[in-house]
Amino acid sequence: MVETGYQPNAIARSLKARSSTALGILVPDLTNPYFAELSLWVERTANGLGYVVLTAHTECVPSVEYEAGRALVERRVDGVIIAGISLHSALPKALLDRGIPVMLVSFGGLDDERLGEIDHDDERAMEAIADHLYTLGHRRVAFAPQQLREHSGERRRLGLMSALARRGLSPVELERATAIVAHNDMQAIALINQFERQGIRVPQDVSIVGYDDIPMAAHSRIDLTTVRSNAASMARRAVELVVAAAREDRHICSRDVESNSLIIRSTTARAAQ
Amino acid sequence: MVETGYQPNAIARSLKARSSTALGILVPDLTNPYFAELSLWVERTANGLGYVVLTAHTECVPSVEYEAGRALVERRVDGVIIAGISLHSALPKALLDRGIPVMLVSFGGLDDERLGEIDHDDERAMEAIADHLYTLGHRRVAFAPQQLREHSGERRRLGLMSALARRGLSPVELERATAIVAHNDMQAIALINQFERQGIRVPQDVSIVGYDDIPMAAHSRIDLTTVRSNAASMARRAVELVVAAAREDRHICSRDVESNSLIIRSTTARAAQ
DNA sequence: CTGAAAGCGCTTACAG
DNA sequence: CTGAAAGCGCTTACAG
């Protein structure tokens, strides 16, 4: 096929069929293995269904998202998967209004009936983390946000705050904390690096918790306490839902919430003092 | 633009213009941060030039590469960037024969005048590694290959073998080695994990060297001796070359070799005995 | 059942 | 300078 002979022109077919058999994906940061795995599985699943994937790496920068959205609309993608987006972005609604099915994966709460969502149960995860840390004797707990200004980026923080409040605790500054909950594993791993370069030991001086359970979290030298999240299965389901909706020319209108379990490893230990 | 109003149909325009303003990228493993950064910059640079990127994650499996190639040809991409491919693949030639400019990035040696290549100088890097290890007193050195059966996948091994031979050494089995050179950082980091879980210490019992200098290699807990390679600049240049060739309707026909320097960190130490 | 024609939505070359 | 027509390469509905 590739080597020789006739290859039908998919562009002409798309024009006639009014379907590009292409999907768009908006991903905040491919450098984060969690998003890399998510897009890997989106791509793999889509290919299996005869779709091609247009990847846009947005870093949650509104102008980049806007341009990416414009490109996806111009190229008439049959559906869009969003793995993260800036706060208050008008993009999802704009896409939906044009009849393009939109699937949010690994976040949610955008409040449009027409969306598809596969979200994490962050509240529950934060409750499990608070319980774990409280049991270890931690009373000064801090939250380390991510760099990206992402929708739902505050949700883990808020979830942790509530869980602490239920135990009569209020959050403290990073510097005063005996335990730090990071927005995700990449952030947690970066914190370990920062602390250890200053001579602050993890977990002897400070406990650290991540979120995602990226492969590196299980490494002997990191061995991070974290929340397991199954990027592969979320990605597969997300693609199946968008493709089904695209083929039936409708919106997705569904909401899933994944419960993620806490994986206790060695970056959390009993509070020092 | 996205929110409302007319958006020209890029499919119709492509059909008329006989140009899709789309590029394809074949990447072996997005899970490897080196390839993730490479494709991130390919995508970013391409977007800046008005191109969209179709990503195919191949794992160097011939059947997957074949399908991906077919999809890219059907969709009439204006150029293809290959970041890794299986041994003896017929794909590059097939694409070139169809008039599609092809750029190999981070490997090379495919011997077709029409190709563009930005390759690593692996020989030189392996010489620097051999020198470093020899100076530290290592006489039993092993090579740890990658999992992927990739073209040029043997080149680092062969480069190391020659460099060892120049010092009167021949390679040893992994088990007998006092120093191990891994095909890349991911492999090196995986080795550290394996060894340490068996109680073998790095670098006290065995020294380990990587290749790529992914961000994790600079982490305090990994601190890997490795070879620095600039994925971002290679990716940018690769896209510029394919796009220029595509616009002028010609092949790329150029060869670049990057010299990468050895970064000495703490996974290499004096040989034990 | 086979084959010619119309049309997808653009762009571009040409006629008025 | 403006506007109608042709054509990119398919698919599909229709005429023969």
Image (spheres, coloured by chain):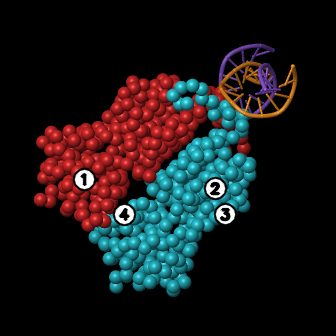
Chain colours: A cyan, B red, C purple, D orange
| Gap in angstroms between the C-alphas marked 2 and 1 | 47 Å
Q: Position of residue B16 (x, y in %)?
A: 65, 27
> Where is mark 2, residue-wise?
A103
Q: Please name the residue that numbered disc 1 is placed on.
A: B174
- Of the two numbered discs 4 and 3 in the rendering, the one whose residue sits closer to the viewer: 4
- The numbered mark, 2 or 3, whose residue comes first in the sequence reads 2
Residue B44 location (% of width, % of height): 49, 44
Residue B178, percent from left and from top: 19, 55
Depicted A27 relative to depicted A267: above or below = above
Q: Is residue B125 above or below residue D2?
A: below
Question: What secondary structure is found at the residue carrying circle 3?
Answer: strand
Which residue sits at x=42%, y=71%? A225
Q: Is residue A270 above or below residue C1?
A: below
Question: Which residue is under mark 3?
Answer: A255
- Three-letter residue code for mark 4: His
Closer to viewer: mark 2 or mark 1: 1
Separation of residues labelled 4 and 2 (CA atoms) = 32 Å
Separation of marks 1 and 3 at Cα, in angstroms: 50 Å
Q: Does A204 sit left or right of C11 as displayed?
A: left
Indicate the amino acid at tag 2. Met
